[in-house]
Image (cartoon, grey):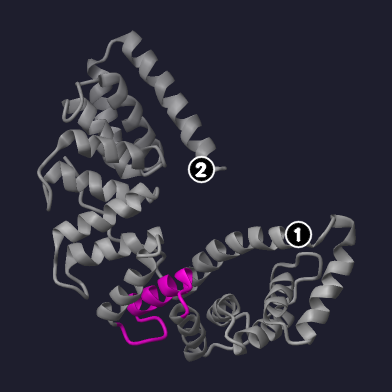
Amino acid sequence: MIPSMAWQAGPAGPCQAAERVRWYSLRMFRYLLIWFLLLAGPSHAADEQFDAVREAAERGDADAQFRLGFLHDTGDGVPENDAEAVLWYRRAADQGHAEAQFHLGMKHHSGEAGSGNDAEHVHWYRMAAEQGHTIAQYALGSMYANGDGVPMDQAEAVRWFRRAAEQGHIWSQFNLGIRYFLGEGVPRDEAMAVHWYRMAADGGHPVAQFNLGVIYATGQGVPEDDAEAVFWLRKAAEQGHVVAQYNLGQMYANGDGVPEDRVEAYAWLVLSATLGMREAHLEVESLTQVMTGPELEEARQLARELWDTISSSRNM
């Protein structure tokens, strides 16, 4: 049996959404900050570099104002200080600096700017998004999709997801695929759903990979193709997607798209059961009754190897 596709694209509430967007962005911009410091000079001159950035910021340099805000935001080389971060982000944002606008939006969204004003975070996300800031476009699309700080508007969500998706943002590609498949904000179009799922799946999005696997297994918008279903389910399963692991185990158990292989089936079903898939426990018990001792030993060893590989890749 192939369970339904996964539609839950993100966290349940706006605060969680803000935190995920924040984590994604801060990780990326930390690399940019390191790059800047490496260009500026050796590490022993960090204090001088900070002073130089501050002097440039006080002279009105928008890039320096953003960098100074980011230093205070992350506590890199200075004590973490939300008020100072907001001050310098705002000065840069007022000059049209897209990264500063986005970060200021995040500070308001998370409440770290000392204001619960929804209009403020929406305003700054929109300012950054209109300049082409990909993650701001995704954030704005998510807010319209969920009615977070703005009236729920799926057509507007699609507009912003599309702008980010066309720049290669895989979460936006995935969300655009969902909307085409369900017909939310756009006419229902399974072919376009497959297109955007594939874009996200090629970028490594595990739920898009899982959904593609289900689409090929059930022939929704594409010719039914069990081998292609196995390909995408494996991609998702190798990233720890529990239902994909269960489905992949079932495909091996039944010989759908692959030669029947009880060892592979058992290994994937054990992983899924270990990670909480209740149905997988029953399948493991059934396989245990019909497998030989050597088969079980091989299957358990394979399950351990898969577990170690998946765990290490997820902890990188």
Query: Within the image, what quadrant is residue 97 found in?
Result: bottom right
- What span is in magenta? 131-152
| Residue lying at 25% horizontally and 50% vertically, measured from the top left | 211
Residue 66 left/right relative to 153: right
> Are dots 2 and 1 in contact, CB under 8 Å?
no
| Residue lying at 72% horizontally and 77% vertically, measured from the top left | 64
Measured as percent of width and height from the top left, residue 203 is found at 39, 50
**Helix, strand, or loop for circle 2?**
helix
Of the two numbered discs 2 and 1 on the same chain, state the one appearing first in sequence.
Answer: 1
| Residue lying at 12% horizontally and 45% vertically, measured from the top left | 218
Q: Is residue 150 magenta?
A: yes
**Helix, strand, or loop for circle 1?**
helix
Residue picked out by circle 2 = 314
Say what amino acid the circle numbered 2 marks.
Answer: Arg
- Viewer-side residue, 52 vs 236: 52
Near mark 1 (Cα within 10 A), the count class, few <14, some 14-19 or many ≥20, is few
- Viewer-side residue, 199 vs 59: 59
State the mark number for residue 39: 1
Say what amino acid the circle numbered 1 marks.
Answer: Leu
Report whether residue 8 is seen: no
Reply above or below: 183 against 219. Answer: below
Quadrant (top left, top right, bottom left, bottom right) of the N terminus: top left
Task: Single out the mark in the foreground, 2 or 1.
Answer: 1
- Viewer-side residue, 34 vs 197: 34
